[in-house]
Image (cartoon, rainbow, N blue to C red):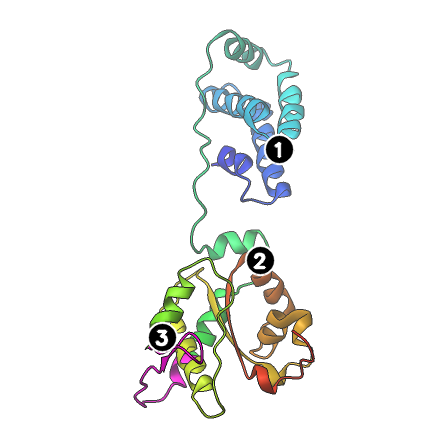
């Protein structure tokens, strides 16, 4: 799998270079060169393929390693190199597999902070705090003067399935906006899947400057570390449920 790691951009560049370098070291192992002819043939083919087919910076690195490997004075390896040059090469299947949905080992190798454990903890806390009260979804209408009413939960789910970015719920004080927002968050956590969009309920009056970094502030309030926050902001999507806009410290939109 070293060839796959070297070819796959999901890995950090230094890890890909290390994989290619490891292949070169295996190839240059003079002690086992004659006993491992088949393996060395594959290594040479892999380095050739990386040097010719990669479209990023690993291509130059593979070319340098290939030149070093081909400079060997070992007779067996020299013959092997000529065979590879004269024969039609059989491409080594360095196919790029789709990234796993969740791989703690991959995260550890790439020095990524563990975010899914913290997300599962947050999900559990939210679901445990929902209580046993029966919740009835409110009815709403598109404008104050509209006569047609619709189920607000259904309309929000329709919005979440679309490409639209903002859904604003207006209503009088005590109409149930906050209750709806909390119920929506519970519903989204109940249906949360690993690597899915993260529902983040934020009570705006508790955020000093929400216009600056709302997501980071919201995550800090539920005990995520700075490295976790950076990882989530770079690689994940959120569903922001902002409550109490009329009570917030905002002076402008």
Q: Position of residue 47 (x, y in %)?
A: 56, 25
Return the residue found at the far top.
86
From the image, tell me which residue sits under label 2.
112
Crowding at mark 3 (Cα within 10 Å: few <14, some 14-19, many 20+): some
Mark 2 surroundings: few (<14), some (14-19) or many (≥20) residues within 10 A:
some
Q: Do tag 2 and tag 3 residues touch (Cβ < 8 Å)?
A: no
Q: Residues within 10 Å of mark 1 (few under 14, many from 20)?
A: few
Q: Residue at x 53, y 44 (%)?
A: 10
Residue at the image position 68 percent from the left and 81 percent from the top: 208
Disc 2 to disc 3, C-alpha distance: 36 Å
Front one among 210 and 9 = 210
What is the magenta segment's predominant secondary structure? Answer: loop
2 or 1: mark nearer the eye: 1
Residue at mark 3 to residue at mark 1: CA–CA distance: 46 Å
Find residue 19 and name its label: none
Q: Which stretch appears magenta?
A: 126-149
The residue where tag 3 is placed is 153
């Amino acid at each position: 799998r070293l060839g796959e790691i070297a070819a796959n951009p999901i890995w950090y560049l230094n890890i890909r270079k290390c994989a290619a370098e490891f292949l070169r070291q295996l190839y240059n192992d003079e002690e086992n060169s004659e006993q491992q002819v088949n393996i060395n043939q594959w290594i040479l083919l892999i380095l050739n393929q990386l040097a010719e087919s990669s479209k990023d910076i690993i291509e130059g690195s593979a070319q340098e390693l290939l030149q070093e490997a081909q400079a060997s004075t070992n007779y067996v390896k020299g013959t092997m190199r000529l065979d590879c040059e004269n024969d039609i090469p059989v491409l080594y299947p360095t196919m790029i597999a789709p990234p796993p949905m969740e791989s703690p080992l991959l995260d550890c190798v790439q020095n990524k902070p563990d975010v899914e454990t913290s997300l599962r903890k947050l999900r559990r806390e939210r679901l445990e705090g929902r209580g046993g009260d029966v919740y009835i979804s409110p009815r709403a209408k598109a404008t104050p003067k509209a006569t047609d009413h619709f189920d607000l939960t259904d309309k929000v789910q329709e919005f979440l399935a679309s490409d639209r970015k903002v859904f604003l719920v207006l209503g009088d004080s005590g109409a149930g906006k906050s209750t709806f927002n909390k119920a929506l968050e519970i519903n989204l956590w109940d249906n949360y899947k690993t690597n899915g969009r993260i529902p983040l309920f934020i009570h705006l009056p508790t955020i000093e400057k929400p216009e600056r970094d709302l997501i980071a502030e919201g995550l800090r309030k539920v005990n995520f570390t700075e490295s976790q926050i950076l990882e989530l902001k770079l690689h994940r999507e959120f569903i922001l449920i902002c409550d109490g806009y009329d009570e917030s410290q905002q002076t402008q939109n």
